[in-house]
Image (cartoon, rainbow, N blue to C red):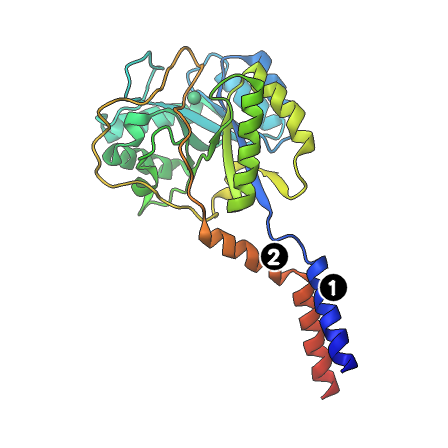
Amino acid sequence: MLQFRRFVFSIVSALALASPVYAGKLAIVIDDFGYRPHTENQVLAMPQAISVAVLPNAPHAHEMATKAHNSGHQVLIHLPMAPLSKQPLEKDTLRPDMSSDEIERIIRDAYNKVPFAVGLNNHMGSAMTSSLFGMQKVMQALERYNLFFLDSVTIGNSQAMRAAQGTGVKVIKRKVFLDDTQNEADIRVQFNRAVQLARRNGSAIAIGHPHPSTVRVLQQMLPTLPSDITLVRPGDLLNEPQVDTSRPHTPPPATAPRNPFRGVNMCQPKQTPEPVYATRFFTVIGESMSQSTLVQYFKHQWQGWGNKA
Ligand SMILES: [Zn+2]
C-alpha cells in the first residue's frame, strides 16, 4: 500500500514537473529589401534569425543581400509576380503566360543579383501564384537552383504547394503579415498573433516590411519574446508539416483583391484565417511526453523492476 502511495505521489510530482506541451518556432522575414538602406540596416542590427527578402532589381539589392549574409541573416529572393489588379510593376515581373525559358531567365538573373539566397518568396503575385501552370514553371526553375519557396500567400487559393508536387522544391507558407497598416498598435497585435500561431501549430512564419513603425515594434517586442517561442530562419521550417488548402483549377475571382503597390510599399492583401494543424498538435504532445519527467520516471521504474526480478 505504501508503495502504491509513493507511486501515485511520483506520478503527480512528475506531471507537475513535466515540460510544457506547447512550444513554437517563429520565423520573421522582412520583405522588399533593396530600396531603403537606412531602415534595412536597422533590421540587420536585429537578431540573426530575422531573415530578409531582397527585390532583385532594387538599386541596393546586391549590397543589402551581401550585408545581410555577412551579418548572419538568411537571404531570400523577393521575386515580383503579377497581381490580379492593375498597378505599376517591377521590371521582370513573372506572368503565368511567360514561357518556361523566360521564367528560367528571370530566376537566373535574380539569383545572380541576390547573392547568398537560399530561398525565394513572391512579391505581390495574386495572379501568378493562383495559376497552377505558371507556378509549375517557377518550381521547375527553382529546383535547378536548389531554392525553397516561401509562399507569401497574397491570394487564398495559391497553387504553389500543388505546383511543387513531383519536384524537389520545398514549399512553406506565410501565416501572418505584420504590417498591413503602419500603426504600431496594429503591428503589435499581429506580432502577438504570430506568436500564438507558432505556439498552437508548432511553427509560424510572419512577413513584415522595412517600415520605421515595423522596425520599432520588432525592437520593442523581440527582447521580450515568450520563453517557449524560438526565433528560427524560414529555412529551418522546410520539414514542418504543411497543409495545402488550395482548390484545383479555380478561375480567378471576378473582383481583384486589395493589392496596392506604390513603389515598394505593400505586397500583400488582407489576412485570411489559418487552419489549425491537428497533426502537429499531437506531434508536439508526443515529443513533449517522450522528454517529460513522467516518461523518464516510468523508464526508470521499468529498469528498476527488471533488476529486482
Ligand atoms: Zn513585397
User: Which mark identifies residue 288?
Assistant: 2
Q: Amino acid at mark 2?
A: Ser
Q: Residue at x 32, y 26 (%)?
A: 126
Q: Residue at x 64, y 60 (%)?
A: 291
Q: Earlier in the sequence, mark 2 or mark 1?
A: 1
Q: Nearer the viewer, residue 236 or 286?
A: 286
Whole-percent x, y for residue 209 in the image: 51, 21
Q: Is residue 35 above or below residue 10?
A: above
Whole-percent x, y for residue 259 in the image: 36, 19
Please state the quadrant of the image where ligand 1 appears. top left
Quarter of the figure with residue 142: top left
Crowding at dot 1, Cα within 10 Å, few <14 / some 14-19 / many 20+, comes out as few
Residue located beneath label 1 in the image: 13
In the rendered image, the residue lying farthest to the right is 2
Q: Nearer the viewer, residue 25 or 293?
A: 293
Question: Is residue 66 in sight in this rendering?
Answer: no
Q: Secondary structure at mark 2?
A: helix
On screen, residue 242 versus residue 75, left or right, reads: left
Q: Secondary structure at mark 1?
A: helix
Q: Is residue 21 above or below residue 246?
A: below
Q: Nearer the viewer, mark 2 or mark 1?
A: 1
Q: Is residue 191 above or below residue 216?
A: below
